[in-house]
Image (cartoon, rainbow, N blue to C red):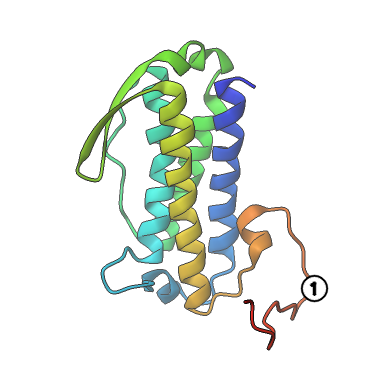
Amino acid sequence: MDLYDATIPPLKRLTDAVQRLLACLDDPAQLEARLAADSFSAAEHFCVALGYVARTVMPLTGDEVPEMPMDTDPGAILALAHDMRFLLDQLDRTALNGADTLEITHVAGEAELTQPGCDYALLYALPNAQFHLTLAYATVRMAGAKVGKGHLDGFHVYSPGTSFVSDTPLN
């Protein structure tokens, strides 16, 4: 599998997941929820996840990553999802030729890292995109949005009312 196939389809699925999840919100205030007082809001997690689309692809194509918006309005997040999907749809497979061996220097929190393109994409950027998407999902679900695993991954289907809560201890 080449780097294009390892990165672009999962990133396209991420942009689609954001759109599915946003469509399930009953109340825009669900985007303001936080899992912890010092964590990002759901809206901020959505923005960061979408920002990782550009943060993944653009260094691999040798392009500068633009400043990504952190507009937490539901319409703005949806527009960003559309923009990121457009970016991916316009990307020619050959744009990533040789990107796996590029040395990419980037900032992770307060750390400055230099990684080969393949490691950067597969071990840093994609996991971080999925991390923020998953936290956005968990946060809006905790805030009462009627979302399930299928809205997140686009694969699972469950009958309404399905629950995995049981009185049997897990240990």
Residue 123: give x, y in percent of width and height: 45, 35
Quarter-of-image position of residue 103: top left
Residue at image position (36%, 72%) is 34
Residue at image position (45%, 61%) is 135
| Left or right relative to 96: residue 158 | right
- Note whether 16 is above or below 107 in the view shown: below
Which one is in front, 119 or 150?
119
| Left or right relative to 19: residue 79 | left
Work out which quarter of the rendered image holds the N terminus and state it: top right
Work out which quarter of the rendered image holds the C terminus and state it: bottom right
Residue at image position (46%, 52%) is 131
Which one is in front, 22 or 127?
127
Looking at the rendered structure, the secondary structure element under dot 1 is: loop
Residue 74: give x, y in percent of width and height: 43, 62
Q: Name the residue under label 1.
A: 159
Q: Which amino acid does label 1 sit on?
A: Ser
Q: How many numbered marks are there?
A: 1
Quarter-of-image position of residue 117: top left
